[in-house]
Amino acid sequence: MKLTRTLNKAGIAVALIVMAASLAALPVEAQKKKSKVNIESDQMELSESENKAEFKGNVRARQDDVSLNSTNLTATFVKTKGGGTDVT
């Protein structure tokens, strides 16, 4: 009985490690995409001096077939070499 519990705990730990490793790759895939991100929220506060926008309340961000729902989301604007802007 004790061996079974130990094996179950080890199996759960391995599964969590595999899931965490696969989730760590998601931001890299998202950065490769250049399609637009649509963000909807109840409120938005833009701070040009800090180069960021804060979205609050019922936030929904969508890019292609991926969507994210949250209560808050902060987007940071970074100037590119070509004069454009990237959002992180």
Image: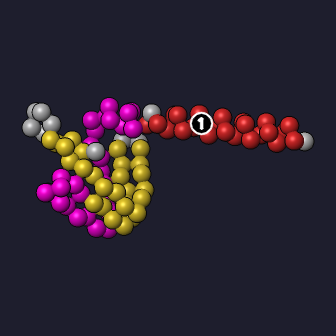
Q: Is residue 45 magenta?
A: yes
Looking at this view, is 12 or 42 the one in front?
12
Q: Is residue 14 left or right of residue 40?
A: right
Which residue is found at the position 20% from the left and 47% from the top?
Answer: 77
Q: Tell me, what colour scheme is on the image?
A: secondary structure
| Residue sitting at the far right | 1
The image shows residue 78, relative to residue 45, as above or below, that is: above
Which residue is found at the position 59% from the left and 36% from the top?
Answer: 17
**Residue 41 appears in which quarter of the rendering?**
bottom left
Q: How many marks?
A: 1
Residue 3's spot in the image, x, y percent? 86, 37
**Quarter containing the C terminus:** top left
Residue 56's spot in the image, x, y percent? 33, 65
Which residue is found at the position 52% from the left and 34% from the top?
Answer: 22
Which residue is found at the position 40% from the left and 63% from the top?
Answer: 71
| Residue sitting at the far left | 83
Q: Is residue 27 left or right of residue 10?
A: left
Residue 28's spot in the image, x, y percent? 38, 33
**Quarter containing the N terminus:** top right
Classify 10 Å Cα crowding around label 1: few (below 14), some (14-19), many (20 and above): few
Looking at this view, is 75 or 59 the one in front?
75
Secondary structure beneath disc 1? Answer: helix
Q: Amino acid at mark 1?
A: Ile
Q: Which residue is mark 1?
A: 17
Q: Is residue 52 left or right of residue 22?
A: left
Q: Is residue 39 magenta?
A: yes
Q: Which residues are magenta?
A: 27-53
**Residue 12 appears in which quarter of the rendering?**
top right
